[in-house]
Image: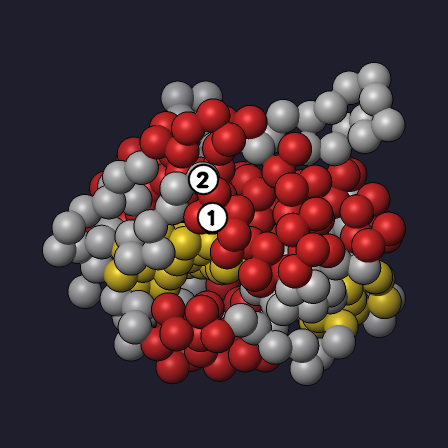
Amino acid sequence: MSHAAGGPQVVALGGGHGLAATIRAARCYASRTTAVVATADDGGSTGRLRGALDMPAPGDVRRCIEAMAGDGGGALAAALGYRFRGTDVEGHALGNLLLAGLAQATGDFVAAVDELCRLVGLDPSEGWVVPATTRPVVLRAETAAGERVTGQVAIAGTVGIERLAVDPREVPAPEAALDALARADQVVLGPGSLYTSVLAAAAVDDLREAVKQAPGRRVYVCNVRAEAGETRGYDVAAHVDALRRHGIEPDVVLAQRGALARGDVGAEVVEADVVRPHGLAHDAAKLGDALRALVP
């Protein structure tokens, strides 16, 4: 696990593989990195545990704890993503089961995440992972045509989304997430699925307001390409317009050079080479260099 002494305090919001890449990038230049992770996933192992135990989604949180721990997290961190085969827990990731067990034992999902962070050796003064909500939420979307869609998996395959919300709307965010945003020198949103990862976190009322009030510069890391479902046909400007419809105004947009068409973004756009050689995903080291250059 690494961090940069004397560097900025960075808060990254989102979910999935995109947020994990941002965590690894921020650890290259930040003195403290806080990941605020969407908790509405309802697919795979996560969906099965949510259905059985009425808990926030553990999968993206587990993936982000792995990323935050890095190579210094020891055997436990390395095993968090292990998926069981041929047993009664077929398909479940070890880290998902640990979070589920800790949540049941403590009665508090935030406490469960804190405990797993400690177990893999994270130092709260350097890096921590926080769920976006303290309680379970469901994603609900409405399309421009008025269609209403429920659940992350269904929304991910939906074209023409106009609005996204979490249900219940009044669910609180953990105090640790709000405190980190109040001290942030930089707030990074994305990369990742626009509606089902980035806005799944930023649409939480407490977090949206905290992002607005954060003293640091708000950076949106745009995806390398539009998705077949939720962002079909989107250029960079369409991504940013969606953020604005949900009350998020980025100060600067970081986009891969030569990837998506830009369009009329209406905000500062910085283009850089931030992808892996195959061009399909962000490279943590390159992304770290580009984000470091955008610290106020």
Query: Is residue 207 something one can see in this rendering?
Result: yes
**Above/below status of 270 relative to 278:** below
Front residue of this view, candidates 253 and 205: 205
Mark 2 residue element: loop
At 79% from the left and 47% from the top, the residue drawn is 49
At 53% from the left and 71% from the top, the residue drawn is 174
What x and y, as percent, mark residue 9?
A: 27, 61
Q: Which residue is mark 1?
A: 117
**Above/below status of 122 relative to 107:** above
Q: Which residue is mark 2?
A: 120
66 relative position to 62: left or right: left
Q: Image quarter for residue 183?
A: bottom left
Query: Is residue 192 something one can see in this rendering?
Result: no
What x and y, as percent, mark residue 91?
A: 77, 28
Q: Are marks 1 and 2 in contact (CB under 8 Å)?
A: yes
Mark 1 residue element: helix
- Label 2 environment density (alpha carbons within 10 Å; few <14, some 14–19, many ≥20): many
- The residue sitting at the front extreme is 105
152 relative position to 265: left or right: right
- The residue sitting at the left extreme is 6
What x and y, as percent, mark residue 294?
A: 23, 56
**Above/below status of 14 relative to 278:** below
